[in-house]
Amino acid sequence: MIEYKGYIGSVGYDGEAGIFHGEVINTRDVITFQGKTVRQIEKAFRDSINDYIEWCESEGVSPEKPFSGRFNLRLNPELHKKVAVAAGKLNISLNKFIENILNDEVKKILPR
């Protein structure tokens, strides 16, 4: 994974073609890049992000922001009830309860 201006790129290697290829993973817009070396893939990633932002400006549209801080979560009604009761017992909002749990799980996977 690589990051630039809040955009995150996932990189893979195609051994047959002998190139690195990547895609920005935190937007719905499709932004890809490729290179033959680590330096080239990093530069291509930054260039693709800059090109995307410049294209958006020239078209008069806002670039898609990588993360807004909001997402919808669907639960079955029984789990929704249990989560709400658990949050209430801790005297915190449902949002804060879920945020705490997600934060704990993410720390296990991404410790930094």
Image (cartoon, rainbow, N blue to C red):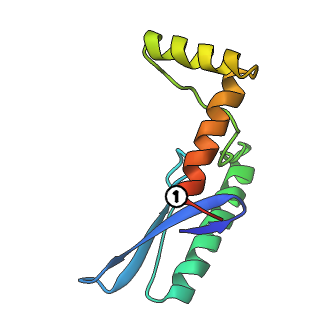
**Residue sitting farthest toward the left:** 16
State the residue in front, 41 or 12. Answer: 12
44 up-or-down from 100: above or below: below
57 up-or-down from 61: above or below: below
Q: In which quarter of the view is residue 11 placed?
A: bottom left
How crowded is the residue under tag 1: few (<14 C-alpha within 10 Å), some, or many (20+)?
Answer: few
3 up-or-down from 37: above or below: above
Give the residue pinned by disc 1: 109
54 up-or-down from 105: above or below: below
The residue sitting at 63% across, 72% down in the picture is 47
Image x and y of residue 28, in percent: 52, 44
Image x and y of residue 34, in percent: 46, 76
The residue sitting at 64% across, 72% down in the picture is 46
The residue sitting at 68% across, 17% down in the picture is 89
Q: Which quadrant: the C terminus?
A: bottom right
Label tally: 1
State the residue in front, 26 or 103. Answer: 103
State the residue in front, 49 or 3. Answer: 3
- On screen, residue 74 versus residue 100, left or right, reads left
Q: Check disc 1 and give the amino acid type.
A: Ile
The residue sitting at 68% across, 50% down in the picture is 56
**Residue sitting farthest toward the front:** 89
Image x and y of residue 71, in percent: 60, 31
State the residue in front, 89 or 21. Answer: 89
Callout 1: helix, strand or loop?
Answer: helix
Image x and y of residue 87, in percent: 66, 21
